[in-house]
Amino acid sequence: MVLVASVIVVVPAHASADVALNTYTAPDGSKQFISDGDSMPIGSTLQIGVFVSLDSCDPVTVSWGDGASGSRNYGGSLAENWQHTYNSSGTFTISASEPCGSGTGQTRTINVASSGGLFGGAVSLTRQGHSSSPQSSVSFSDS
């Protein structure tokens, strides 16, 4: 009688959690699409999707880059929508992770700045008058 032994080595999969930017809702209620590296105004609420692989474990944790984070159980789901409001300006890197993964997956970066469009707020122009014409001022505001 011949006995044959075999060993099967199973290498754990490298689970990951990836971030996809969707839209943001500005303080005035308007909704805009946003891409990696884009800007949005202070007070905007960012909506993202976080995708996990089949071999991921709960809980999934999102770090918003501004010191805030949150966790939730996916319970076998592969994707969930998340949202977060940014109340200060800066450049923030958003990442997601889960305990079976070998680190964070794909990250995204956004810029949060004061509203104000092209000039970042109010703009004032002053025309200097000559002795025969009075001085005049013009102000523009994005309020």
Image: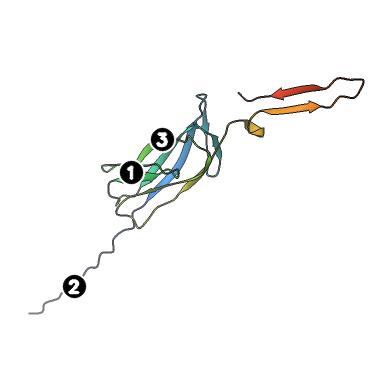
- Tag 2 and tag 1, C-beta contact below 8 Å: no
The crowd level at tag 1 (other Cα within 10 Å; few <14, some 14-19, many 20+) is some
Q: Position of residue 16 (x, y in %)?
A: 36, 52
- Amino acid residing under circle 1: Leu
- Amino acid residing under circle 3: Gln
Residue pictured at 42% horizontal, 36% vertical: 84
- Tag 3 and tag 1, C-beta contact below 8 Å: no
Q: Position of residue 35 (x, y in %)?
A: 53, 41
Which badge, 2 or 1, comes first in the chain's sequence? 2
Which badge, 3 or 2, comes first in the chain's sequence? 2
- Which numbered dot is residue 78? 1
The crowd level at tag 2 (other Cα within 10 Å; few <14, some 14-19, many 20+) is few
Q: Distance of mark 3 from mark 2, alpha carbons?
A: 50 Å
- Amino acid residing under circle 2: Ser
Q: Quadrant of residue 2?
A: bottom left
Q: Distance of mark 3 from mark 1, alpha carbons?
A: 17 Å
- Tag 3 and tag 2, C-beta contact below 8 Å: no
**Depth check, front residue: 19 or 43:** 43
Q: Which residue is mark 2?
A: 6
Using residue 4 as the reference point, say whether residue 72 is left or right of it: right
**Depth check, front residue: 4 or 66:** 66
Work out which quarter of the rendered image holds the N terminus and state it: bottom left
